[in-house]
Image (cartoon, coloured by chain):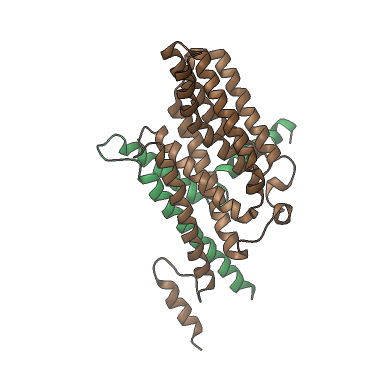
Amino acid sequence: MSAVARALRAFASFWFDFIVGDDWTVAAAVTAALFGTWGLTHTVLPAWWLLPAVVLAVTTASLHRSVARDRRRDEQGR
Amino acid sequence: MNSAVLVSTFFAAAIEVIEMVAIVVAVGAARSWRAALLGAGGGLLVLVVLVVVLGAALREVPLAPVRLVVGALLLVFGLQWLRKGVLRVARDGWGVGYGDEDVDPADPASVGFDWVGFVLAFKGVSLEGLEVAVIVVAFGAAAGAVGAAAVGAAGAVVVLGVLGAATYRWVAAIPRRALQLFVGAMLTAFGTFWAVEGLGATWPGDELALAGLVVLYGVAALLLLALVRRWRRGPAAPRLDGAGEAAATARRRP
């Protein structure tokens, strides 16, 4: 692989890890919430509340999945 | 020199500078001071170039898209730290991880230059610095006293920068795992605030909403920590559909 290709791959990998990290559902939920917030700004409803609500919900769900995954791994390891 | 413009600009810029310094100090303490300071320096350099090149036309720079992009990126990254901080503190407790003791071999901060810390500090300083520059141009042009406005803004950067540097020892004394959790909450709050503003929505209480978000996510982090500890201790990880308890009971039967 050429040096340029390696540099491009490293750059892409950096931004993928920065944005998606270890749980793609969080980035997806945040993206959806941003679109939802934008949609709400075109209505008479307040738009500020949607993103914090989604952030809290998706973080809780993500942590729950992490703990469940760790427990399954521990049980399989026994 | 127009002292009214100087003082007004000092206080208006101070709000933005506080956010800037908070991000640099938090990233420096949690990741790498070298990367954070270089990122901050890079952000200031870009800002100086923009001010020199654009001058008064800086007022025409659309801040909303910049806020949205920077805010969204800070938000998703802050959430990663928040989640990892909660999981690690739940696993190991608060008092683990002073300085180099807690370097995770998988964490890029421990290998070579910390580009993540650099990007976080760069983005925070660039965005807030751009807002400070717009304040200077707006206040200064309106009163015909750009010089006084620039001095006021520079004064805010110096005073709050020194205060931020003075907090270094206090912040560095916080265990790294705990720092990751609270810095994650802080970055998530900043990202949420800026992203929503960038989309054209307004927050109740304007800038005060940012403080409210920091408190909200900080409290949420502590509640999530308690939840995660309970899930880890429980007989089975509870499923959101309630089937977890039934499965655990079935496994316990001979």
Horizontal side, residue B187 vs residue A34: left or right: right
Residue B87 lies in quadrant: bottom right
Residue at image point 59% right, 51% down: B180
Question: Residue B88: x, y in percent?
Answer: 60, 60
Question: Residue B119: x, y in percent?
Answer: 61, 36
Asked whether residue B59 appears in the rendered view, the answer is no
Question: Residue A63: x, y in percent?
Answer: 50, 59
Which residue sits furthest top?
A: B144
Tell me which chain appears brown.
B
**Measured along the vertical axis of the image, is residue B208 above or below residue B224?**
above
Viewer-proximal residue among A72 and B41? B41
Question: Residue B54: x, y in percent?
Answer: 53, 14
Horizontal side, residue B223 vs residue B113: left or right: left
Horizontal side, residue B19 vs residue B38: left or right: left
Residue A37 lies in quadrant: top left
Which residue sits furthest bottom?
A: B254
Asked whether residue B35 appears in the rendered view, the answer is yes
Residue at image point 47% right, 29% down: B11
**Measured along the vertical axis of the image, is residue B149 above or below residue B40?**
above
Q: Colour of chain A?
A: green
Viewer-proximal residue among B70 and B132? B132
**Measured along the vertical axis of the image, is residue B110 above or below residue A75?**
above
Residue at image point 53% right, 67% down: B229
Tag count:
0
